[in-house]
Amino acid sequence: MKVLNRHEELALLAVWRLQPEAYGVSIRRYISETTDATWSVGAIYDALERLALWGHLTTTQADPTPQRGGRSKRYYSLTRTGYEALVCMRSVHDTLWDALPDLGFDVSTAGNE
Amino acid sequence: MNSVKQPPKVASLILAVANREPLRAAVLGDFQEIYDEILEAQNLWTAQRWYWLEALKSIPQFMKFYTTWRMTMLKNYLKVAFRNLLKSKFYSLINVIGLAVGMAVFLFISIYTRHELSYNKFHANHQSIYEVEIGGELSTAAPLGAEIQAQFPELQAMVRIDANYGGGRSPLLVTGTDETLKRTKTENLLFVDQHFFDVFTFKVIHGDPVTALEQPYSMVLTQSLAMQLFGKTDAVGQRIHYIGDRSSTPEMEMTVTAVVEDASSNSSLQFNGLVSFATLYTFNPNGSPVDKDWGNWGYRTHVQLDPTNKAAFEEKLNGLWKRASLAKWPDSEPDPLTLVPLAEIPFFNNNRRQFITLMQIIGIFVLAIAVINFINLTLARATTRAKEVGIRKVVGSTRQELIRQFLCEALLMSLIVTPVSFVIIELGKPLFYSIIQMEIAFNWIKQPGLILLFMATIFTVGTVAGLYPAVVMSSFKASSILKGELNRGRRRQALRFTLVVFQFIISTALIFSTLVISKQINYLKSKPLGFDQHHIIHCKQSNQINERYDVFKNRLLQDPNILSMTRSNSALAQSLNIGSTAEINGINREFRATTVDPDFLSTMGIELIEGRDFSWEIKSDYYKAMVVNETFVKKFDLKNPIGQEVRGFLGYTPVIVGVMKDFHNDSFYEPIQPSALIYANWNSTINIRVNGENMAQSLKAIEKVWNEISTEFPLEYQFLDETYGKLYQSEEILVRILTSFASMAILIACLGLFGLISYSAQQRTKEIGIRKVLGASAQGLMGLVAREYLLWVTIANAISLPLAAWAMLKWMNNFAYQAPLTAAPFILAGASALVIALVTVSWQAIRSANANPLKALKYE
């Protein structure tokens, strides 16, 4: 199994959440909002195109519209292998978390102490 | 929409370039969308700024994405390339060796020519420094410099160098006190004006360059002379006792005022030490005050001025010169003075530039031959790669990508060749130095230019060698390749033919030129000079010998091995050192002259054809008698030369007493000049004719007597025939270079031919096998394989020889005396190219002709 990196995982999750309306701007906005950080367009596309190359995503070129300076959108959607990769990542996370003892931290306030 | 509200054009252009379709449209659209959002929510400036920053931030990521893919393809290309290299080790080896040798030769020649062209350019002011030239020589009167200094204050600087007619002075330097007393004979000491270091860029290590040459008896040493004399470089303040080598330079107490770095090999000004010009004023070497006598020549005058004022200054300079000259010599019109830029000095009045161009051409040719090998072998073997091309095309490779792939392979090849040629260069250095008779320090680390040149060569070789095969191989049609109907292409065959012929045209031309040039030089060296130059020893006299010359002479002549001796102004094997003009019967002409004593003609064995020789007995011969050569008689159209007065010879008006046979006192570049000998006592060179059979004994005898009389100066002698031989040094270097590089060229061309024929024999293995089974003879088969190539070489000969002959005839025009162009070099050059090709070809041909036909037919 190929472990996805953080960008790839987030992008894949965002596509899953947003499809069929998953394209560059919406994905970027969604990830930026959930992570509370600004993501560069390049970073998003870097991850997306790599995922597309591995077959985790398929792409569809929409017809150009008068908005966006007459340029078409590139829609992404999850494939079967993409879904499997996500499930796999989840099980990795779960296994790692489960192996930890409960230290009684309140995770939400941990950073403020 | 308002056009002002459009996103920044440049940034979107950058984005567009960084991306490809279909991503390009999507990315640009996304950018535009977000831009519009920001524009609506905030202001134009924020939106614009966002666009720019975001674009710049994103580009590395886009680039990364694409380069990853390029790298992946590159990896594949390299893998395939390596596999191919290893699969056909033999052809790879031929390619690598050929290219490596070609590249090494090219780089050697580049290093050499770069060095030759860099002369004097290390002087920071070299573009504003000029040297004064008159009548083809860089020698002027001493007062010229002084007058320039006095009359043209606008001049930046003036520097005279008393080079003593080019040789510099060779005094004896005594250092240390009683016990540590050391006597060192040194050479090439120059007397220079005080602004020497302002004008020329020589690095002063110790001492003050501004004042170093101001005072009389100041001396500047080079680092190596300082080490030799004092064992350390910081010799400032040391005292040196100077004993001059001529009667005109006295003994002096000098003080070292500075130490400079040794002059680099690309300086035309070479010296071991400098003495302040002011020192000359204290002893007036030519008898009268240095700066007053316009007859006092042998000084090299340099001026530094703004190059834009050159023409104007030249005119003023000539005005000054003309006035001075007419005052001194009222009846002769002076030659004009011209200013020669410092960087032009090494090329002044010689054919060195031509020589350098020739070298460059040879270098390029040798490299071209190696590149052609690569092209030929790649093309010949193109069929082996055809299937790969077909598959790649079917899988979706574009032609562009295929070209890129093959170019990559060629570049890879030149990268593999690089270390090999490095090794060749390092190993070949000593040989190279011995060929050019010089050591050029080339340091890869210190000279980034060299590395650049090297890389440029590699890149160019790779591209040139790879481009054509790449274009051809990528043009194969996938469908026809896979169907197995790749046409062999008459056109490609024709190209291979052209290229091989071209290689052999060059090789044969190089062989031919080598033969002709060495023949010409042998001709010059063996051509009778008009007198017997063998068994003559010449040396400069020392002060002590000069004072007791009669004793020296009488003692020596008692030895039966010493046949005779004479003194002359300077040694032969150069142009006679006094240039003069005379008017006889209305004919005004230049002639060359030198002074001798009355034993000159008999010692040298120069034949007298009319009149009489000088005589020791006839007192009136002194300064008044003159012996002229046949050319002199002819040029001045003298019906009755004996008794003729020659007006205009430095005001002496001598009378012609004899006419001698023409002899060559200079190289054979020059025709014989109207020349004259005058009996006078300005002589400092001793010429001794000895018995050739007892050379060692004779030398010992001379040395013994010399050492008894000249206790200070050791004897330094030369053989006259060798001195004459040295006149052709640059031609000999040319011959050596041509010989070595012509053989390289031939070697590389043959390697290529060998590769080609091996390949074609291999292709025809089956055909040869069948022919053999059917009863073809070995000779017949050899002919079959080799015939074609030998025909090519013959055609190459037919084109090459006339071209080379034409070029050589042009070159020979440099010489006043030319060896006749016979058939020998033609036959030899043509035949040797053919024989070498034949040997190359036969080896393979015999191999395939003798191979077991069973094997050939079983293969596959």
Image (tube, rainbow, N blue to C red):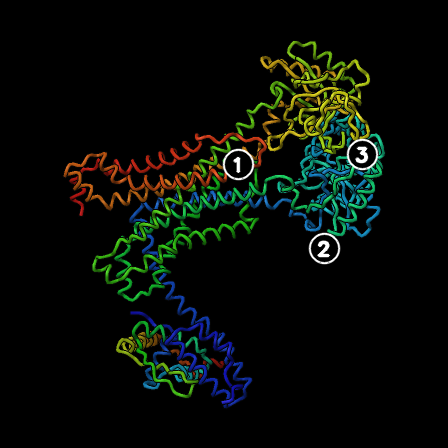
Q: Is residue B548 left or right of residue B268?
A: right
Looking at the picture, tell me which residue is in the foreground, B734 or B462. B734
Disc sitting over residue B308 in the figure: 2
Q: Is residue B172 left or right of residue B767?
A: right
Q: Secondary structure at mark 3?
A: loop
Q: Is residue A30 left or right of residue B7?
A: left
Disc sitting over residue B295 in the figure: 3
Amino acid carrying mark 1 in the image: Leu
Q: Is residue B38 left or right of residue B117?
A: left
- Report the number of discs: 3
Q: Secondary structure at mark 2?
A: helix
**Mark sitting earlier along the chain (3/1):** 3
Q: Position of residue B765 (x, y in %)?
A: 21, 43
Task: Report whether residue A106 is seen.
Answer: no
Distance of mark 2 from mark 1, alpha carbons? 38 Å
Q: Secondary structure at mark 1?
A: helix
Looking at the picture, tell me which residue is in the foreground, A15 or B404. B404
Q: Position of residue B705 (x, y in %)?
A: 70, 15
Amino acid carrying mark 3 in the image: Gly
Looking at the picture, tell me which residue is in the foreground, B292 or A15. B292
B501 relative to B296, above or below: below
B604 relative to B456, above or below: above
Mark 1 closeness class: few <14, some 14–19, many ≥20 residues within 10 Å? many
Distance of mark 3 from mark 2, alpha carbons? 32 Å
Mark 1 belongs to chain: B
Disc sitting over residue B734 in the figure: 1
